Amino acid sequence: MPFMKGIAPIRRTVQYLQSGKLSLKDRVQVFSVHYNRLGENHQGARDFVFWNLPKVQYQNPQVQVVTFKEMTPTPFIRCYLDSGDDVLIDVDNKSKEEIESHLKLVICKSDELLAKEAIAQEKKDNEANFGYGCQRHCICEMPGQVPCSAVCPLPNHMRGKLRFSTD
Amino acid sequence: MASKAVRLLGRCLPFFPGKSIPNATRVQIRQLELDENINMYFPKDTTFFAHDPGQVCKPGDIVLISSLPKKLTPLIEHEVLKVVYPFGDITDPITGKKVMNDMYREDIEYISEMYGKNKKGFDYENAPERGWQEDKKDFSHKQSYRRFQVYDKEDKQPYAVDY
């Protein structure tokens, strides 16, 4: 880990950032967290911001992730959607894990949707192609085609060296 | 296919010292920018002009702005959707009560009653709206200019701004 400076430098590794599980829905445009520096009821929100906020921003680069401190007595998360509505999530006295699991249920893409999107994003070449770099090495692998001549030699009347030989 | 309007949450800044831009407020947006060398996010501020015909925004308010489908003027690309948290007069969205930093106003009032209410203290209930001294004693909303070079002590320039 290069530059192991500061508190918990693990947060500054690419593997850590990529391990974020909160992939916000496309509707979410702004993700704002309100919390205070002091207060036991804000501890969960503080932990969430310390550990998870970089992951959230990394997973959702198009969302504006913003924090507000010392504004209200109780912590909350407010997400502004593109329809004009906002989703208000009360995180008073909740732990970091509770906040994360709640967010995953409420405003994140489900695991099934993420899997579907991953499949759709994969580059799909023409499945009918065969050869180097393709799914099938040779057309002889397909049932119904002429079998591999290394395994099963062609009949003599089809072999050019025997048809056209001058012997 | 029209591109989606981008919504951003920002803080209103005071007027722009220089050319007067009518019906617009300056909004500072704070976004996180990834520093590739240490893989850390740092806040980066950008300033936009947001179309605000009713002049609902005052400096310090937290507002929600949205990008316009077409630029209004070469400078104005966004419009103010709503003032989310007016400066100094924040309503806690969870309870709906008025707050001041980390206390509810009703708690502040209760404590001050217990200690003995200060007659000169700020009265939230009966205080006038923000901006009541504009054009009377508060001229910060008016157009001004950046302070010229001060060559001697007599050159006061009381209406200049330093930023």
Image (cartoon, coloured by chain):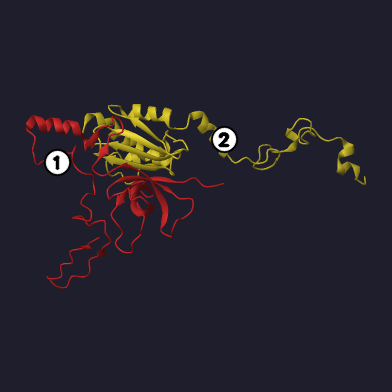
Chain colours: A yellow, B red
Toward the viewer: A167 or B103? B103
Task: Please tell me whether mark 1 or mark 2 is closer to you in this view.
Answer: 1
Tag 2 residue: A119
Q: How far is disc 1 from disc 2 in space, using C-alphas?
A: 61 Å
Confirm whether residue A15 shows in the render: no
Quadrant housing residue B126: top left
Where B88 falls versus B112 (above or below)? Answer: below
- Figure quadrant of the C terminus of chain B: bottom left
Toward the viewer: A153 or A56? A56
Q: Chain of mark 1?
A: B
Instruction: Give the amino acid at mark 1.
Output: Phe
Quadrant housing residue A66: top left
SS for callout 2:
helix
Q: Chain of mark 2?
A: A
Counting from the top left corner in percent of width and height, residue A83 is at: 45, 38
Confirm whether residue A154 shows in the render: yes
Counting from the top left corner in percent of width and height, residue B45 is at: 33, 51
**Residue shown at 37% from the left, 50% from the top:** B37
Tag 1 residue: B122
SS for callout 1:
loop
Q: How many marks?
A: 2
> Which residue, as the protein is rendered here, is positioned at the far left?
B116
